[in-house]
Image (cartoon, rainbow, N blue to C red):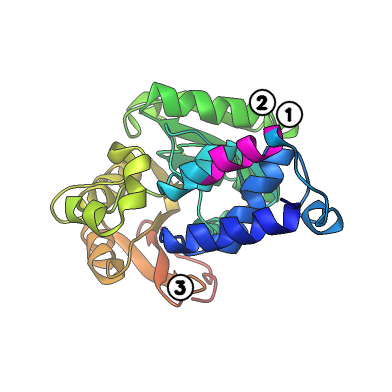
Amino acid sequence: MTLAEVLQKSTEWLAGKGSDTPRLDAEVLIGHALGLERIGLYTEAERPLTDDELVACRALIGRRGEMEPVAHITGRRPFGRLDLEVTPDVLVPRPDTEVVVDVVVELAPEGARIADWGTGSGAIALSVADLRPDVTVTGLERSPEALAVALRNLHANPGLEDRVRMVQSDGMAAVAGEEFDLVVGNPPYLVSADLDRYPALRHEPQQALVAGPVGTEDHARVAAEAAAALAPGGWLVLEVGEGQADPVAGILAVAGFGEVSMRADLAGIPRAIWGRSAQAEAPDSPAS
């Protein structure tokens, strides 16, 4: 079979297995199996594949047919301007989270000290440091396996190593007594039933997905810990799930944060929510 035929058959098969993006999945996985950039799939479209190449392509497409994340199959995921290593020990960085990064980049004062609560792969911490060369970022992660991934991603971006540190910590326990100008977090925000609604999520670490019976339990924890760790007038920025913006706004208010704002992702779902410590007068915050 030619490369074009394999690509078309793989697309059709993945669509039948429930992939939301069957063509893209097929292009990424076949390109990965053959060592081709995306354009190469089309410049070499009429080339017949060898038996070994067919076996390699079928193996990766078959894994995706089981709804294993593409990023876990390839071991890589682009996020912002970075290309990150991803394993089953960390959440797959999603485009929605780039909205959170945008807010942090806009809010952080010059020379800010930033803490990333639950850094996972390091996606937020590294992206913020990449976009803001004046800030320092501490990534906090309780899972030693996830922390190892974050450290590898940090070392793969040596230009950031002097401004980013990765620390094993349950919440902010390991940095107790330190003061930050901004705390950001993408805490677990699902409930157990969500795993039945979205079977693909079962391939990702459950402790990084499920917060509890309500879904906002970890938002309350981050808010309490951030309130104690922030410098006067510091900011807290959180990612929230669909339908959680208003409940989390209430959590921030109870924790003493004012000027609560939110911003939607590209689908129009409120995704980032932030507030400022009531200890100081705030400058204008970015437009919601």
Residue type, numbered disc 1: Pro
Question: Residue 269, percent across and down?
Answer: 40, 73
The stretch in magenta equals 52-61
Q: Is residue 197 above or below residue 52?
A: below
Sequence-earlier tag: 1 or 3: 1
Say which residue appears at 82% left-offset and 52% top-offset. Answer: 40
Name the side, left or right, on which 37 lies relative to 204: right
Density class for disc 2 (Cα within 10 Å; few <14, some 14-19, many ≥20) is few
Say which residue appears at 25% left-offset and 51% top-offset. Answer: 195
Asked where in the image residue 144 lies, by quadrant, the reply is: top left
Q: Secondary structure at mark 3?
A: strand
Identify the residue position indicated by label 3 in the image.
264
Density class for disc 3 (Cα within 10 Å; few <14, some 14-19, many ≥20) is some
Which of 27 and 146 lies nearest the eye of the viewer?
A: 27
Say which residue appears at 65% left-offset and 33% top-offset. Answer: 163
Overall secondary structure of the magenta section: helix
